[in-house]
């Protein structure tokens, strides 16, 4: 389908992922129509306030988005037997401000049912983390209980990013726009400016990811380099490669409000204790 073609040239893992996502969107549309998803959304309660939760910080350097993540394309299985709802409950009790749920099946061993389960078991906001390419997936996320969704600027391209951001805001999902380099930083700033015209009260949540999407390697300095260019009136999220208290302190010193952590939590013997060590927040 023409509307599911990438806007920008993709290679390697990203091209593979686009093909996977396009196929899933096509399959989803055949099973449940866009109109049916809209009808379901009309009966749902308002989403939880993702950006507000990330800004409600008590006695720690940063807030934390804790991730339910069974595997990754770079590391393989991390915690393949993880029960999404139980892990999310442990995260919330340990002081997480939001939960990120990987719903990608092939490389991350996630699913949409994980999203539904987590959303039903915690009181804090829940984000669908996936390689989203079409507004259909935003409606899908909303129907499965998401309060927010990840949008990867370097994957979408400038025009599609702005359109996906508009769709998320239309259906009351807070987009976390993820940035990987200078070029897609500019696309993100353009998308924010464009969408603020229709949503002047919107507080954008912008993340700088230290992972190179082509090689899947992590460059922690990228978070520090690009973070300085993020607007002051946004919630700033540091992503990937955060494993130690020193990593957190560096992110906070660079002006980040929030950290998104997956691997360091799911591989820890005690995820709650891992959160406490990272944020310095006492575990309840």
Image: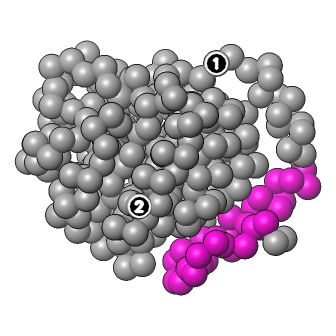
Task: Point out the stretch of residues depicted in magenta.
Answer: 3-31
Q: Is 218 placed left or right of 253 in the picture?
A: right
Q: Residue at x 29, y 62 (%)?
A: 210
- Position of residue 196 relative to residue 134, above or below, is above
Q: Position of residue 277 (x, y in %)?
A: 15, 36
Say which label, 1 or 2, has the lower sequence index: 1
Looking at the rendered structure, the secondary structure element under dot 1 is: loop
Q: Are marks 1 and 2 in contact (CB under 8 Å)?
A: no
Report which quarter residue 60 is drawn in.
top left
- Specify whether residue 73 is painted magenta: no
Disc 2: CA contacts within 10 A as few (<14), some (14-19) or many (>=20):
some
Disc 1: CA contacts within 10 A as few (<14), some (14-19) or many (>=20):
few
Report which quarter residue 117 is drawn in.
top right
Is the N terminus in the top left, top right, bottom left or bottom right quadrant?
bottom right
Residue 117 seen in the figure? no
Looking at the rendered structure, the secondary structure element under dot 2 is: helix
- Which color scheme did the rendering employ for the protein? one colour
Disc on res. 46: 1
Is the C terminus in the top left, top right, bottom left or bottom right quadrant?
top left
Q: Residue at x 26, y 53 (%)?
A: 229
- Position of residue 216 relative to residue 224, above or below, is below
Mark in front: 1 vs 2: 2
Residue 284 seen in the figure? yes
Disc on res. 168: none
- Specify whether residue 29 is painted magenta: yes
Q: Which residue is mark 2?
A: 186
User: What kind of secondary structure does the magenta stretch mostly adopt?
Assistant: helix
- Position of residue 177 relative to residue 158, above or below, is above
Distance, label 1 to label 2, CA atoms, is 31 Å
């Amino acid at each position: 389908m023409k509307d599911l073609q990438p806007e920008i040239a993709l290679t390697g893992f990203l091209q593979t992922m686009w093909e996977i996502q396009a196929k899933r969107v096509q399959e989803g549309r055949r099973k449940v129509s866009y109109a049916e998803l809209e009808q379901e959304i009309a009966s749902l309660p308002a989403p939880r306030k993702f950006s507000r939760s990330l800004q409600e910080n008590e006695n720690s350097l940063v807030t934390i988005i804790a991730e339910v993540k069974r595997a990754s394309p770079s590391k393989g299985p991390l915690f393949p037997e993880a029960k999404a709802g139980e892990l999310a409950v442990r995260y919330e009790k340990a002081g997480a401000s939001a939960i990120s749920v990987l719903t990608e099946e092939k490389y991350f061993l996630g699913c949409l049912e994980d999203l539904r389960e987590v959303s039903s078991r915690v009181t804090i906001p829940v984000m669908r983390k996936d390689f989203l390419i079409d507004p259909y997936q935003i409606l899908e996320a909303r129907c499965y209980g998401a309060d927010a969704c990840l949008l990867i600027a370097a994957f979408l391209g400038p025009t599609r990013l702005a359109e996906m951001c508009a769709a998320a805001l239309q259906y009351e999902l807070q987009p976390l726009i993820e940035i990987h380099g200078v070029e897609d930083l500019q696309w993100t700033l353009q998308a924010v400016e464009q969408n603020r015209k229709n949503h002047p009260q919107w507080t954008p949540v912008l993340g700088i990811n230290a992972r190179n999407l082509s090689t899947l390697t992590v460059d922690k300095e990228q978070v520090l380099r690009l973070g300085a260019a993020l607007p002051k009136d946004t919630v700033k999220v540091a992503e990937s490669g955060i494993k130690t208290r020193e990593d957190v302190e560096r992110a906070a010193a660079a002006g980040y409000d929030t950290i998104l952590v997956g691997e360091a939590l799911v591989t820890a013997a005690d995820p709650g204790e891992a959160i406490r060590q990272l944020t310095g927040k006492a575990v309840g």
